[in-house]
Image (cartoon, rainbow, N blue to C red):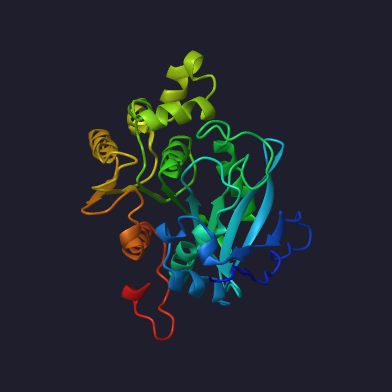
């Protein structure tokens, strides 16, 4: 039997502020567990990909703590160990409900994105990672995404004028809401996102989970559904959107992507749609291609591509 071990990555502090600037958010190093100890980690990376990402000293991952609606909440920050210049930023929005941690699930993807020249910031949302507050899955927790903007502006190596949103599943719904409400992203990408909460609530397992997520659903159903259903306000989406969805997605039916694309088209909004044959909820079987499609999309909307590292072709990124 393999013995579980924890790999500790030495993390540099956030770059200190210039004279006269306010201090940035608190940051701490991230501990990565052994691959075998994380349930379902194979949905995010192979053992070799994970261990290579954890061992790469060219990049560092920090957990930052920042203020949102009077709460201390957390986000992951993944960046080069020695940043040079100001880099575009991808704000990645995870799926699911509350998580104690998701650094292990994030690190392989974050490394792929960082190797294309991006800083990656991933909000955990209130109620996760030991943070105070309650995750409403698209309610007040949307503020935790917007309140990352001052954090990003304080990073001397991040370019706040080149912001991009990337979300999977629940995170895709958060991306749609952020674009509706004016998040200053140049472009966005969603994977396995739902666009009609009423349709999701007709699925038995979702209906069961809804009682925990929204205990007041019976009295506020229309308001809860309206806020989280991008189909109802697609005309308010304020940036080009790449919509990716697995043809065999059993968690969120591909019709959510098809219908959202139709609504965007009717509203004259720029988008691109890919239904990927043979893939499930997060396109995990084609993760490298998925992330390349996303970064290619962002580069078409103002993010300069990073030069390949020595011995690395662009297709291997």
The answer to whether residue 64 of the structure is visible from this angle is yes
Residue at the far top in the pictured view: 219
- Number of residue marks: 0
Residue at the far left in the pictured view: 277
- Image coords of residue 215 (percent x, y): 54, 22
Residue at the far front in the pictured view: 1
Q: Residue at x 40, y 78 (%)?
A: 308
- Image coords of residue 247 (percent x, y): 23, 47
Work out which quarter of the rendered image holds the C terminus and state it.
bottom left
In this view, 241 is above or below 301: above
Picture quadrant of residue 169: top left
- Image coords of residue 143 (percent x, y): 58, 37
Query: Who is closer to the viewer here, 14 or 44?
Result: 44
Residue at the far bottom in the pictured view: 311
Q: Residue at x 45, y 70 (%)?
A: 47
- Image coords of residue 164 (percent x, y): 45, 53
Would you say 298 lies left or right of 211 here?
Answer: left
In this view, 191 is above or below 237: below
Would you say 121 lies left or right of 40 here?
Answer: right
Query: Who is closer to the viewer here, 308 or 257?
Result: 257
Q: Residue at x 22, y 54 (%)?
A: 278
Picture quadrant of residue 249: top left
Q: Residue at x 60, y 65 (%)?
A: 32
Picture quadrant of residue 299: bottom left
The answer to whether residue 300 of the structure is visible from this angle is no
Query: Who is closer to the viewer here, 86 or 52?
Result: 52
In this view, 63 is above or below 309: above
Would you say 44 lies left or right of 279 here?
Answer: right
In this view, 311 is above or below 159: below
């Amino acid at each position: 039997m393999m013995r579980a071990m924890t790999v500790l990555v030495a993390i540099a502090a956030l770059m200190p502020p210039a004279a006269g600037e306010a201090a940035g958010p608190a940051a701490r190093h991230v501990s990565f567990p052994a691959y075998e100890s994380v349930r379902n980690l194979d949905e995010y990376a192979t053992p070799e990909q994970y261990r290579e990402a954890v061992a790469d000293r060219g990049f560092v991952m920090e957990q930052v703590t920042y203020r949102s609606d009077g709460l201390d909440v957390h986000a992951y920050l993944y960046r080069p160990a020695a940043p040079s210049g100001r880099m575009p930023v991808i704000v990645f929005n995870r799926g699911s409900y509350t998580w104690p941690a998701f650094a292990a699930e994030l690190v392989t993807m974050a490394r792929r994105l960082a190797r294309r020249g991006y800083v990656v910031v991933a909000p955990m949302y209130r109620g996760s990672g030991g943070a105070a507050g309650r995750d409403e899955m698209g309610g007040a927790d949307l503020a935790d995404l917007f309140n990352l903007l001052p954090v990003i502006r304080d990073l001397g190596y991040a370019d706040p004028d080149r912001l991009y949103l990337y979300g999977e599943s629940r995170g895709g719904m958060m991306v749609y809401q952020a674009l509706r409400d004016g998040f200053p992203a140049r472009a966005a990408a969603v994977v396995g996102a739902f666009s009609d909460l009423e349709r999701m609530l007709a699925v038995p397992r979702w209906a069961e989970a809804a009682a925990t997520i929204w205990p007041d659903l019976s009295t506020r159903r229309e308001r809860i559904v309206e806020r989280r259903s991008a189909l109802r306000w697609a005309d308010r989406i304020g940036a080009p959107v790449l919509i990716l969805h697995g043809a065999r997605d059993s968690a969120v039916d591909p019709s959510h992507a098809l219908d959202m694309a139709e609504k965007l088209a009717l509203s004259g909004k720029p988008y691109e749609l890919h239904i990927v044959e043979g893939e499930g909820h997060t396109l995990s079987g084609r993760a490298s291609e998925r992330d390349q499609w996303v970064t290619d999309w962002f580069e078409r909307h103002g993010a300069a591509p990073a030069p390949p590292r020595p011995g690395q072709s662009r297709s291997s990124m």
